[in-house]
Image: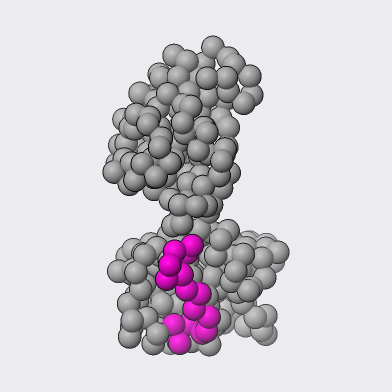
Amino acid sequence: MANEQGRAAAGTLYVVATPIGNLEDITYRAIRILGEVDLVAAEDTRHSRKLFARFGIQKPLLSYHDHNERQRLETLLARLQGGDDIALISDAGTPCIADPGYRLIAACRDAGIVVVPIPGPSALVTALSAAGVSTERFAFEGYLPPRAKARGDLLRQLVGEQRTLVFYEVPHRLAATLADLADIMGGDRPLVVARELTKLHEEFFRGTTAEAVSRFQLEPARGELVLVLPPAKQGPQMNLRDALRKLLNDSDLSRREAVKMIAREYGLPSSDVYRESLNLTKEEAHDE
């Protein structure tokens, strides 16, 4: 195969985006590359065979996912160094975006192997494009932690975030996540829940976090979900001591972690915030 950046002794790794739902969203270039490479590394080979059958692609598949990434990496690297061209695909969307693959990319770069992106669908960009919120600046947080404590700690760090926030979520955790968002971000915080993107039952729910809790308690969601929160409204800041007291009281963060977070939020030197934290007695830090 004559690869797209010139033929070298080693093969080329193609990072190929595949549809997130509607199979018609695959690009001509992606179909061509998948039909020309020597091997396709796929997150779930059973899922990928359905895509291949739809477009008449007949290429060997090798599973490559979170649980075997380290073991497969050496095999794939050896194949590439031996001259094989390989395509990396995920179950849906663009590989390496909240999906396995970055270790393979890094190993290829270190070994001097050419890596070529084949762009296409991404649930992140698809949701943002139709959410109707500001996208000038946004922060993608991937999947929220599955455990309630870790999820709550992360959300508390993001309460005052002035960029649009984007999360991925799975159906069986949606209710708990929405409840945490309403509790920590506020029940009146605007929220967009995008589900079944590009599929027959695609939906964009737009409302508040409290309304989302009610909506998805009555009718549990199916399929992968993207949650989009517009930037937090700027309000009057608490004084430094009150902010420290609240953070130490409402989370399990250490004093050092709390100081770093408050210093970043208030634009102050950490040393100044730390000195102020020492003025809080142990009782003050843990009393309501």
Q: Give yes or no for residue 247 being in the magenta stretch.
A: no
Which residue: 63% across, 19% down?
6
Q: How many marks?
A: 0
Which residue: 58% across, 32% down?
116
Which residue: 49% across, 62% down?
198
Say whether residue 214 is visible: yes
- Taking 269 as reference, is 113 above or below it? above
Q: Position of residue 190 (x, y in %)?
A: 56, 81
Say whether residue 98 is visible: no
Q: Position of residue 210 (x, y in %)?
A: 45, 87
- Taking 33 as reference, is 135 above or below it? below
Name the quadrant containing residue 237.
bottom right
Task: Tell whether 220 sits left or right of 278.
Answer: left
Q: Position of residue 95 (x, y in %)?
A: 47, 44
Image quadrant occupied by the C terminus = bottom left
User: Considering depth in this image, is 154 or 3 the residue closer to the camera?
Assistant: 3
Task: Tell whether 243 sits left or right of 61.
Answer: right
User: Considering depth in this image, is 136 or 22 the residue closer to the camera?
Assistant: 22
Q: Position of residue 36 (x, y in %)?
A: 48, 27
- How was the colour assigned to the protein in this rendering? one colour
Which residue: 34% across, 29% down?
60
Task: Tell whether 162 sits left or right of 101.
Answer: right
- Taking 126 as reference, is 88 above or below it? above
User: Considering depth in this image, is 268 or 116 the residue closer to the camera?
Assistant: 116
Residue extent of the magenta highlight: 197-212
